[in-house]
Amino acid sequence: MVTGIGEFDRVLGGGIVQGSCVLLGGDPGIGKSSLLMQASAALAAKGAVLYVSGEESAAQIKMRARRFGIASDGILVLAETDLGSVIEAIRRVRPIFAVIDSIQTMNSDEIASGAGGVSQLRECTARLLELAKGEDVPIFLVGHVTKEGAVAGPRVLEHIVDAVLYLEGERFHAFRILRATKNRFGSTDEVGVFEMAETGLREVANPSEVFLEERSRGVAGSVIVPTVEGTRPLLVEVQALVTPTSFGLPRRTVNGADPQRVLLLLAVLAKRAGLSAGSHDVYVNLVGGLRIREPAADLGLAVAVASALRDRPADPRTVFVGELGLGGELRRVQRIAARLKEAERLGFERAVVPSASLSDLNGTALEVKGVATLREALENAGVADR
């Protein structure tokens, strides 16, 4: 079933599969209930939708729906925490879509422990999965994430359900990223980008433009990296700040990238390019609350740190992409043509890429410079020794 929310459908693998049981996780207040309320409203035109809430009363849900501009008679609301009553309601109503918000509040009479315990979570999820398969009803479970980043504390739920989605983002940023970490019906590489607004989550159809609209030009430490999330190329701004340390042990603060990867890049910069930050604090940030783990961002991160260390701005019209090896060599990256096409669309003029990736290009208006080593890349960025 297609919900009509394009970003949501993409992450699911094209839409909601009949009889599937999907877990949607995320920090409290990140927008999980809002997203499923909007999906319920989109599907209500096709049939009855059952929204079960163990955290809010029916009146509170109605207030949220009114704030979002949702006024559909097709959404049935049930404020209940007893699993037996919920299963009976689903069998009686036979909805085309059901939401359990949240799985931590459900409890079964067959288990003696309280709601939210490991035994309760496993039992409730297993019975809801059995119900979804037996009645051919797609059921979405909302699960809160603990400080350790696991859904509902234990990760037992992730092995039971068909798909696991995470809604990520900083509480103080407007953007939310929807990812799939497990999906029996589609890819786990896709991401959906949303913006939190007064009327709920709004799709961001062109995230690259949004992430770059406030970029700082001519500032040392700012570099644009064309990354790929699933099938979608995204341009993101990497910022680095390098300052002399006031303590004996320099600080390394990373937001949005892998901290261990940044430490590795600092070592390569020191050994292969002669740029040592041993007596400096290093801060790295990805703008917009994004998180990037792919090695193709290595070159952009290294150029940003080198630019901040030398206090020389990198060329603002150039994008940088490439995986960096320990020998200072640049390695081939995947889908280079799609990355550069997105950069060209947004008005960039040059690209610094690994030499091995030049053979993968099929024509671009960008001035593409292939480099084999980190030193060459820094020279092309204008941040090497003069």
Image (cartoon, rainbow, N blue to C red):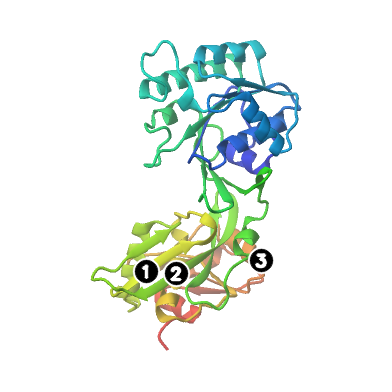
Where is residue 200, by image quadrant?
A: top right
Q: In the rendered structure, which amino acid carries the disc numbered 3? A: Leu
Q: Residue 282: which disc?
A: 1
Q: Residue 346: which disc?
A: 3
Distance Cα–Cα, label 3 vs label 2? 22 Å
Whether residue 181 sits left or right of residue 15 in the image: it is: left
In the rendered image of this protein, does residue 166 appear above or below residue 346?
A: above
- Looking at the rendered structure, the secondary structure element under dot 2 is strand
- Looking at the rendered structure, the secondary structure element under dot 1 is strand
Residue found 37% across the figure and 24% down from its top: 117
**Mark 2 near mark 1, Cβ–Cβ under 8 Å?**
yes
Q: Image quadrant for the N terminus?
A: top right
Whether residue 19 sits left or right of residue 69 in the image: it is: left
Asked if one can make out residue 165 in the rendered structure from this viewpoint, the answer is yes
Q: Image quadrant for the C terminus?
A: bottom left
Whether residue 60 sits left or right of residue 71 in the image: it is: left
Q: In the rendered structure, which amino acid carries the disc numbered 2? A: Ala
Residue found 44% across the figure and 69% down from its top: 240
Viewer-nearest residue: 180 or 143: 143
| Mark nearer the N terminus (3 vs 1) | 1
The spot of residue 357 in percent (x, y) is 51, 65
What is the crowding at mark 3: few (fewer than 14 residues within 10 Å), some, or many (at least 20)?
few
**Mark 3 near mark 1, Cβ–Cβ under 8 Å?**
no
Viewer-nearest residue: 123 or 271: 123
Residue found 66% across the figure and 66% down from its top: 346
In the rendered image of this protein, does residue 366 appear above or below residue 197?
A: below
Judging by the rendered image, the residue that carries numbered circle 2 is 240
What is the crowding at mark 1: few (fewer than 14 residues within 10 Å), some, or many (at least 20)?
many
